Structures are given as structure tokens and as C-alpha cells.
Image: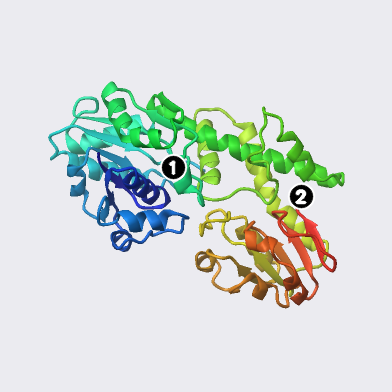
Amino acid sequence: MKLSIIGSGYVGTTVAACFAELGHDVVNVDIDEDIVRSINAGNAPIHEPGLDELVETHAGDRLRATTDYEAVLDTDATFLALPTPSNEDGSIDLGAMKAAAASLGETLAAKDDYHLVVTKSTVVPTTTAEVIGPRIEEASGKTVGDDFDIAMNPEFLREGTAVEDFLGPDKIVLGASTERAFDCLDEIFAPLVERAGNPPVVKTGTSEAEMIKYANNAFLASKISLANDLANICKEFGVDSTEVLDAIGLDSRIGSSFLGAGLGWGGSCFPKDTAAIIAAARSRGYEPRVLQAAVDVNDEQPTRMLDLLADRFDPDGKRVAVLGLSFKPGTDDIRESRAIPLIQNLVEAGADVVGYDPVATENMREHFPDIDYASSAADALVDADAALVATDWDEFAALDSEFDEMRERVVIDGRRIVTRRDGLDYESLV
């Protein structure tokens, strides 16, 4: 099929490249000319394992990019993969989605044959039916259900494994209200279903599909926060939290995934999505107490880590290395990274901060231009009084004699990845 993807961020670029890998003809539409040039040159505009290879393979053949919405006219379906950032109250900002829906509608006014519009962005329940559809109708003069259909296909992509997640999904969720829309979605996803070995395909309404995405992320975020809460309790009793969490993970009702206790969750999804569903619930008069508690526990983990450092010394005037700047390994994304509150509080306390990350340094430099940045973990440790491990990159697990270059050799491990050794004042967060 011929598909158009509006937006070329983490989701849009990954989805476009993967659809091209599955045999569809795909065009990315984006307002950023640099991103368009990058894709057409065969270069992924973001750091994501496996994505460069797909873009390089299919660019100029089954994958291209443009700034012109007219490209939509030659496609059968359009996926809206645009950012939905948080407002101050946690609710989502639909500005980009509304603008894209209006532009898409204006373009579809000139299209005579059927078209399917699929929301790929994470939006709260009823958005596709009550915001996106009407915007397109107003701009196109066409009618949902007659001239075109709307649908919802939430993404479950983890940064660092997004390509793998798309091509090998646990489930595929398709939300629509007409058989014609489902037929089109079936045709789009048939190559993926076959390639992935027939994963479960959930067919439901658009609002249910929207809610499934939020429920999925809210549950996982809450699971991590509960693991952290339990690990914090373990620490108070001198109990090895890893042994406890590993053991409960053997229970089939619990499972071992997302039980890794530590500094907490960040990134583009969990913080934004939990905030959004909390705000949405409150807008309907319901207080989501468990979800709010999950957020509170997550927000407190960096403070607990800094308290462990303060037990050793006042950071004022001390050189502190922060190892790991991205919110998780395998990505250069620093959005809601747990390193950010660590660095912010250390700077405010008068510490001399040096940061290191294998791929996220430049992104963090835009956020904190005045701290030092090292070219390697070893360089970051030279003359440092303390090291705070914020991201569990594999290379930090291999550090050994590099710690000898530190002054006071204090290591506070937020991810329990560094090996305890003689000569280190080592303590894990949990």
C-alpha cells in the first residue's frame, strides 16, 4: 500500500522506515527541511539502534520525505505521528495535532477516492473522534464515515529498541468504527502480522485504543515505582532488594519485567503519559490516587540519591561526575532523564559537575551549557570526589581501575550496575 506519515520524530521515522521494510511505499511529511533532507539522503534524523540501516536501505526507493502535504494525495492512508507535549497542568497539548489535521483536511479536499486517517500519536480517549475527525471534516468539506474514515493505532515502542518493538510486537491494537476502516488496517498490517508470527490483534473502538496506550504505560510506570518503593523499604532493613525482586518476579502473576529498582523512569512516554491520564481523570472529577503515588515515588528517587551523597560530604566545591545523561541506555533522548534533577540540584549546591554519556552529551549540553562534559567515563572520573551513576550503560559495568583516578572515590549507584570493589566507598541507591 501507499502510506503517508505526518511527523518524523522518534515514532514517525521509525514507523515510516519499518513500514517500508514491510514492503509499503511510504512518504514522510515534515515541516523541518533538515529532517527531510536527512531521510532522503538515507540518514536517520535520530539515534535509534537499527533505524539507520533501514533508512539507508529504503531511502530513494520505498521511503522518501517531503515538506509538501500534497504527497498525501497519492497515498491510501495517513498516520499522524506528531508530538503531544504536556501543558503545565499535565494535560496534553494538541496544537501540533490540530494543525496537522487541518492541513491534512485541506489537502484531502482535492482527493476523490477513499482515504484512512490513523492517529498514531498518544492522545487521551475521545481525541480521535471528537477533535481529529471534526478538524479534518471542517477543512476538507468531507464527512467521516462517508468520504474518509478515522482510526487509532497506538504505538508501543521503547526508545533503544523501537525497530525491534515495531517488527516484533507483543500485540497490535487497531481502533476504528467501520468495517471499511478495519479492512484497510488489516491490509496495512498483514505483512507485519505474518512476519511477526501472528501476534494478537486487538480490534476495538478508537477511544478504547487510545485508553489502551495510557493504561499500558501507566501500569508499567506504576510497576517500576512499586518496585522502587519496595526496594527503598528493603534498604531501610538492610535487605538485598535485588534478591527480593528477582524472587517475586518468578511469580507468573507478577513477572520479572520492569522490576529493576533504581533511580526511576523518564523519557518521552511514561512521565508525559502518566501526567496526561491523571489530568484527564481529574477533568472528569476522578482522583487517580495510585497513579499519583507512582509519580511521587519516582520524583523522590533522585532526592534519595543526593541524600546518600550528602551523608558523605557537602557537595559545595566538590567535583561530582554524573555518569549517564540519557533517560535510558540505547538512546540519546534526555527528556525527563533522572540525570537532570541530579545535575540541577548539584549545581545549586555549588558542586563542580562533569557529565558523561556515550551518545547524549550534546543534547544535555543544550540543557546545562555551563557544566563540564567528558569524552569518556574514565576522563569524567579523573579527580572527581564522587560519581553518581544515573543510566545503566553497559560500559559503566566494565569500569574498574578507572575509579583509582578519583580523589575520594565515592560512588553512588542509581542503577546497581557498578561492581562493588575494595577501595571504593560504594553504595547503591536501592
Is residue 278 something one can see in this rendering?
A: no
Question: Left or right: 329 with respect to 174?
Answer: right
Colouring method of the image = rainbow
Q: Quadrant of the N terminus?
A: top left
Instruction: Look at the picture and state if 314 lies above or below 334.
Output: below
- For label 1, the residue is 166
Categorize mark 2 by other alpha carbons within 10 Å: few (<14), some (14-19), many (20+).
many
Badge 1 amino acid: Phe
Expressed as whole percent of the image width and height from the top left, the position of residue 118 reads 32, 36
Expressed as whole percent of the image width and height from the top left, the position of residue 330 reads 54, 56
Of residues 216 and 422, the one nearer the viewer is: 422
CA separation, marks 1 and 2?
A: 33 Å
Instruction: Look at the picture and state if 181 lies above or below 335.
Output: above
The residue positioned 59% from the left and 34% from the top of the image is: 219
Question: Left or right: 22 with respect to 47?
Answer: left
The residue positioned 48% from the left and 35% from the top of the image is: 213
The residue positioned 27% from the left and 55% from the top of the image is: 65
Expressed as whole percent of the image width and height from the top left, the position of residue 133 reads 29, 33
Q: How many marks?
A: 2
- For label 2, the residue is 430
Query: Considering the numbered disc 2 on the image, is that residue within a helix, a strand or a loop?
Result: loop
Badge 2 amino acid: Val
Sequence-wise, which precedes: disc 1 or disc 2? 1
Of residues 187 and 196, the one nearer the viewer is: 196
Categorize mark 1 by other alpha carbons within 10 Å: few (<14), some (14-19), many (20+).
many
Of residues 319 and 257, the one nearer the viewer is: 257
Query: Considering the numbered disc 1 on the image, is that residue within a helix, a strand or a loop?
Result: helix
Is residue 169 something one can see in this rendering?
A: yes
Instruction: Look at the picture and state if 378 lies above or below 69.
Output: below
Expressed as whole percent of the image width and height from the top left, the position of residue 370 reads 57, 73
